[in-house]
Image (tube, rainbow, N blue to C red):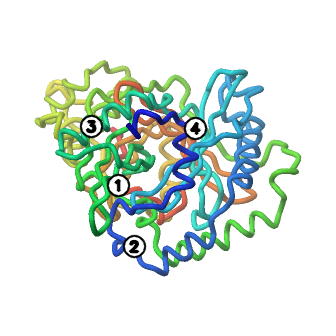
């Protein structure tokens, strides 16, 4: 069967050669936006040069751990696509010898404004054989034959990745299921969102200008790397916890925040204190009022001054910098769909860095996804176009 033959490198080669079948309707993204994205694609070779530069730069700046000293970028990236079938980014493994120590994600289109999406330890490697088996079974359970199915690695709700499996129809785009790459759950339409759709057309245009302006300053492949001027801080001793269920990100993030303040709570205890079923997740208000602000006597964290800030305001960096400088981690929620704050993914921010030359800003994120493991990385913040739907400032 088709699915059983893939390993991660063969998948990347097949995806590059096959005709794209949109996972969502082409009408969901305008032809003008599609054109600017595709007209500003970068090649894999260009992305590889950027990946090498970013690794060398972050190591030189002292922003990565000892395991990255002497690490190199694998020349064999995995191409990850947006749910509408447009190439989104290249994921390059970072290797120390033969051991994978992390990953660097390089944007596939200049509309992002700069090459780097994120760099760090990243999630664990995808078990492609098992994922393909689960995808095949999911198709059978849905009444479809996997024999003619085509597959695509998709970022179905940034940063979450899954396998999009499309069964062709006699007419039209066919039927697609998306299976999470780690917990193998079938993702409903309400849990899918396009990263490209979160960027406005004007922001895409300005992003291309910004990217090309940075390119003019140096040829990345030949640039001699030296420590750049940065303003940076991370919270030493902050602990990563993986979420224990598909929708448990808010509780895993709250566990991280609690541990920072010396409070030991299980994810289930946090959900129970908030008065919610953990399998259904929690809104920003439920986790803030129901846990962060509740007194210790009520089972809460006792941070009565906690508040929610909606959106990705232009001064978000200044707000987060002030909190981190005060040794207070922040919750950053990223949206499944633009402008929707009821369906989000929670992560803890425990650091920041600003390149004083380019102005690029990075947040150090402790992500509870994938389930039962989590991921740690520096992620570039690109202002109001970032799909950040809200932040929770946890404070007394």
- Callout 2 crowding tier (Cα within 10 Å): few <14, some 14–19, many ≥20: some
Q: Are marks 4 and 3 in contact (CB under 8 Å)?
A: no
Dot in front, 2 or 1: 2
* Label at residue 306: none
Q: Could you tell me how far apart the alpha carbons at marks 4 and 2 are, in whole angstroms?
A: 29 Å
| Whether residue 249 is situated above or below residue 99 in the rendered picture | below
To which residue does mark 3 refer? 185
To which residue does mark 1 refer? 335
117 sits to left or right of 210 = left
- Callout 4 crowding tier (Cα within 10 Å): few <14, some 14–19, many ≥20: few
At horizontal 59% and vertical 49% (from top left) the residue drawn is: 90
Secondary structure under the numbered disc 3 in the rendered image: loop
To which residue does mark 4 refer? 9
To which residue does mark 2 refer? 29
Q: Earlier in the sequence, mark 4 or mark 3?
A: 4
Q: Could you tell me how far apart the alpha carbons at marks 1 and 4 are, in whole angstroms?
A: 30 Å
């Amino acid at each position: 069967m088709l699915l059983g033959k893939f390993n991660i490198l063969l998948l990347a080669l097949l995806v590059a050669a096959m005709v794209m079948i949109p996972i969502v309707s082409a009408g969901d993204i305008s032809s003008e936006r599609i054109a600017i994205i595709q007209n500003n694609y970068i090649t894999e070779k260009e992305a590889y040069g950027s990946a090498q530069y970013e690794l060398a730069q972050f190591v030189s700046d002292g922003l990565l751990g000892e395991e990255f000293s002497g690490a190199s970028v694998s020349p064999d990236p995995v191409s990850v696509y947006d749910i509408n079938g447009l190439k989104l980014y290249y994921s390059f493994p970072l290797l120390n010898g033969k051991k994978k120590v992390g990953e660097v994600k390089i944007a596939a289109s200049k509309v992002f404004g700069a090459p780097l999406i994120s760099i760090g330890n990243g999630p664990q490697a995808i078990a492609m054989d098992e994922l393909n088996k689960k995808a095949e079974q999911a198709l059978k359970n849905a009444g479809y034959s996997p024999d003619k199915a085509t597959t695509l690695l998709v970022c179905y709700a940034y940063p979450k990745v899954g396998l999009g499996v499309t069964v062709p129809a006699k007419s039209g785009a066919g039927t697609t299921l998306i299976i999470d790459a780690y917990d193998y759950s079938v993702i409903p339409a309400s849990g899918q969102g396009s990263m490209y759709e979160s960027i406005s057309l004007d922001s895409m245009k300005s992003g291309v200008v910004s990217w090309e302006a940075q390119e003019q300053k140096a040829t990345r492949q030949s640039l001699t790397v030296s420590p750049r001027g940065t303003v940076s801080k991370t919270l030493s001793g902050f602990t990563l916890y993986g979420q224990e269920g598909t929708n448990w990100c808010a509780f895993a993030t709250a566990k991280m925040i609690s541990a920072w303040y010396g409070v030991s709570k299980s994810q289930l205890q946090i959900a129970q204190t908030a008065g919610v079923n953990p399998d259904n997740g929690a809104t920003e208000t439920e986790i803030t009022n129901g846990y962060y602000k509740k007194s210790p006597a009520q089972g809460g964290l006792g941070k009565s001054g906690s508040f929610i800030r909606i959106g990705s305001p232009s001064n978000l960096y200044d707000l987060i910098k002030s909190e981190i400088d005060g040794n207070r981690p922040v919750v950053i929620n990223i949206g499944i769909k633009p402008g929707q704050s009821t369906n989000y993914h929670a992560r803890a921010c425990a650091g920041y860095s600003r390149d004083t030359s380019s102005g690029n800003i990075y947040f150090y994120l402790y992500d509870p996804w994938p389930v039962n493991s989590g991921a740690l990385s520096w992620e570039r913040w690109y202002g109001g176009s970032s799909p950040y739907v809200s932040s929770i400032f946890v404070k007394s």
